[in-house]
């Protein structure tokens, strides 16, 4: 895509795969500066996406490129470009799988789906551990040869439980925590200690129903669309930046039990896409929203 040094046939395996993501105040010359830097360092652009938000005045960019260099050299040499445009930027190895921790309570559909996708290669992550406040899925997790941690949670033990969770995150070098139907509200302190590193999934009906048995409420109201929302977790309950949403049309003949089944499928789809895009460094925070280069 760029005019940098071409990769000869047979040499592609020697090339490192990298992803650069950035956000900064929108200005002229950003794309030119990035592409010129990659050309001067002998790198070749494989794919590039960018977006300028007129509302916030911010510019966002994701570049997938190859080069015979190291991550350390790239990070050291790109800092001058980043400083000149006041960029918030990161460079990652594209082939390096993100280490993910899953959290679950007593609804295992999302857990099972993510474990299976990871095992088959459909989801480019390494599941480092599973944490649950119950033991229901210990055997399932063991069948995938993934460490399972039972951390009971009560009102009195919640601070200690969250500290143990953070210890596991540190020990397992976890980069992303996924709440795969984990039915405990995380404290403000935990959310602030893992900003932009926790993804949650919850039902999102049109119209929305809260409280007990939401699918039964939806059935009673005769809804025609049900859905799910995957979002980053913040101190504001279920109001973090949205990454992905999925909906499914339903007819008047469906039962509450059928709605539950459809809802589970929708939740799995939305959550899997959100985790995949995050792990591939395709999601950039834009205030209370996200930019997703899918």
Image (spheres, rainbow, N blue to C red):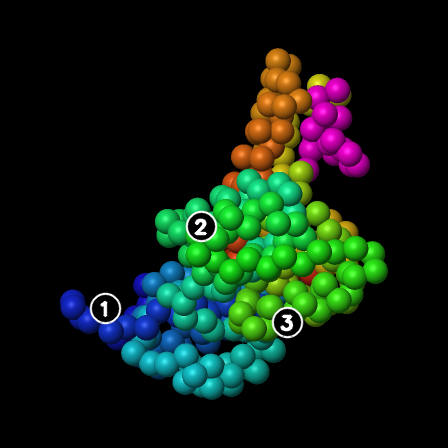
Residue at the location (45% across, 71% down)?
A: 92
Boundaries of the magenta span: 204-220
Using the numbered discs, state the Cα–Cα distance from disc 2 to disc 3 in whole angstroms.
24 Å
Residue that lies at the very extreme toward the left in this rendered image: 9
Where is residue 67 drawn, in percent x and y?
Answer: 32, 75
Image quadrant for the N terminus? bottom left
Sequence-wise, the earlier of marks 1 and 3 is: 1
SS label for mark 2: helix
Residue 172 seen in this snapshot: yes
Tell me: residue 4, above or below residue 183: below
Using the numbered discs, state the Cα–Cα distance from disc 1 to disc 2 in whole angstroms.
36 Å
* Proximity of marks 2 and 3: CB atoms separated by less than 8 Å: no
Using the numbered discs, state the Cα–Cα distance from disc 1 to disc 3 in whole angstroms.
39 Å
Residue at the location (47% across, 73% down)?
A: 91
Determine whether, in the image, residue 85 is placed left or right of residue 113.
right
Residue at the location (72% across, 25% down)?
A: 216
Report the disc number at residue 193. none
Where is residue 220 drawn, in percent x and y?
Answer: 75, 20
Please tell me in which quadrant of the rendered image residue 218 appears: top right
* Proximity of marks 1 and 3: CB atoms separated by less than 8 Å: no
Q: Does the magenta stretch include residue 259?
A: no
Where is residue 15 drawn, in percent x and y?
Answer: 28, 73
Sequence-wise, the earlier of marks 1 and 2 is: 1
Q: Mark 2 points at which residue?
A: 143
Q: Name the residue under label 3.
A: 167
- How packed mark 1 is, by other alpha carbons closer than 10 Å (few <14, some 14-19, many 20 or more), is few
For the image shown, how many numbered marks are present on the structure?
3
Residue 245 seen in this snapshot: no
């Amino acid at each position: 895509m760029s005019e940098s040094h071409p990769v000869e046939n047979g040499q592609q395996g020697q090339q490192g795969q990298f992803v650069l993501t950035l956000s900064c105040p929108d200005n002229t010359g950003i794309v030119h500066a990035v592409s010129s830097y990659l050309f001067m360092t002998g790198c070749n652009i494989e794919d590039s996406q960018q977006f300028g938000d007129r509302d916030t005045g911010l510019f966002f960019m994701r570049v997938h490129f190859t080069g015979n260099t190291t991550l350390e050299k790239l990070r050291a040499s790109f800092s001058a470009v980043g400083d000149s445009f006041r960029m918030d930027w990161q460079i990652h190895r594209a082939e390096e799988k993100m280490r993910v921790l899953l959290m679950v309570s007593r609804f295992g559909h999302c857990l099972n789906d993510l474990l299976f996708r990871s095992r088959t290669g459909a989801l480019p992550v390494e599941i480092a551990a599973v944490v649950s406040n119950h033991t229901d899925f210990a055997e399932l997790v063991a069948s995938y040869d993934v460490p399972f941690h039972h951390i009971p949670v009560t009102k009195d033990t919640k601070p200690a439980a969250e500290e143990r969770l953070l210890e596991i995150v540190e020990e397992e070098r976890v980069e992303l925590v996924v709440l795969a139907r984990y039915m405990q509200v995380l404290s403000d302190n935990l959310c602030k200690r893992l900003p932009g590193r926790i993804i949650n999934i919850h039902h999102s009906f049109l119209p929305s129903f809260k409280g007990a048995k939401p699918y039964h409420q939806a059935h009673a109201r005769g809804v025609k669309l049900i859905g799910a929302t995957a979002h980053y977790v913040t101190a504001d309950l279920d109001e973090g930046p949205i990454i992905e949403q999925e909906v499914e049309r339903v007819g008047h003949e469906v039962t509450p039990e059928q709605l539950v089944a459809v809802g589970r499928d929708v939740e799995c789809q939305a959550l899997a896409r959100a985790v995949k895009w995050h792990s591939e460094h395709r999601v950039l925070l834009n205030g209370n929203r996200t930019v997703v280069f899918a």
